[in-house]
Amino acid sequence: MLNLPKYVDDDGQPTYLAKDVEDHLNAQQRKRDAYKAKQEKESAIYRKNQKAFLKVSTKEMNNINKGISLVDAGLFFRLTMNMQLRTGSMLVDRVSGGEAQPLTQTDMQKLLNKSNRGIKKVLMRLEELSVIRKEKQGRRAVYFVNENIVSIGKQKNAQPFAKVYKVKAKEMLNDLTDSEVGLLLKLMPYANYHYLTLTHNPTEADPKKAKPLRMQEVAELVGITEQSFNVLVSKLKRKYALATLDTGTKGKALIINPYLCDRGNDSKTIEAIVSANFRLMEN
């Protein structure tokens, strides 16, 4: 029923003015056009954002998962956001006049909200873990990410990896604690190539064999207690970074927000479904 003023015609029947009806239909069409334009704009931004991504090595990240703390993993992940395609593994503040300006310790203090003493301790721990390295260039120290773990651009020896979309990652990481960021990084090696859920074998395509990792199993893999893991998962779910799916007898399956991380399989039906779920959560 139209929500318009009603009038009575010559036969005593309720009716509407033709102009009111026309205005109403035009207004409805404008709304549809605006909605379509909004969707097209969001799609264009999404496609553009998908081009800027980091690669997190499945094998290497899995190897260091138990050896790196949640906080250090989170701090490391934040630093990788300063990798750029033109400068490779170097941590860069900006590129000015075609010349890269390396990220300084002062820059890192502001970025990670650390004191001068605190950032030195962080960098020392990350160097000891071999996830970053320091090189002297003149009087200044320049830091590089271990490309075997996180890389950007093409590599000579391609290894299985998870894609991390920088634009969405930067936006999301701003709302997360270091421990929450660290857990997301630690979970990435287990994202299944075909279903995006965290599984025992990330390359398994057979749904009968792709066994989801139980919460307790994931906690053990990333090196934290089940209680701490459950608390962090709950927080990440509230911040739309993670979701859980009930798989029946196999327990709950974890999925990382595919706008943040996937396996480069955005054309797959499963990702379209999961992406739509996360989009609905954010509305």
Image: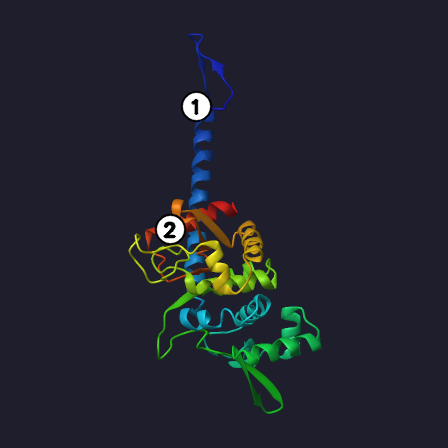
- Give the residue at x 50% y 60%: 219
Residue 106 in the image: state x and y as whole percent.
66, 77
Residue 153 percent coordinates (x, y)? 41, 74
Q: Position of residue 22 (x, y in %)?
A: 43, 29
Q: Which residue is mark 2?
A: 272
Q: What's the residue at 51%, 69% (across, down)?
A: 66
Q: Is residue 38 visible?
A: no
Whether 55 is drawn above or below 278: the answer is: below
The residue depicted at 60 percent of the width and 64 percent of the height is 178
Amino acid type at image mark 1 = Ala
Q: CA separation, marks 1 and 2?
A: 43 Å
| Position in image of residue 196 (x %, y %) | 39, 56
Q: Which mark is residue 18?
A: 1
Q: Is residue 137 above or below residue 14?
A: below
Q: Nearer the viewer, residue 60 or 10?
A: 60
Question: Residue 79 vs residue 213: left or right?
Answer: right
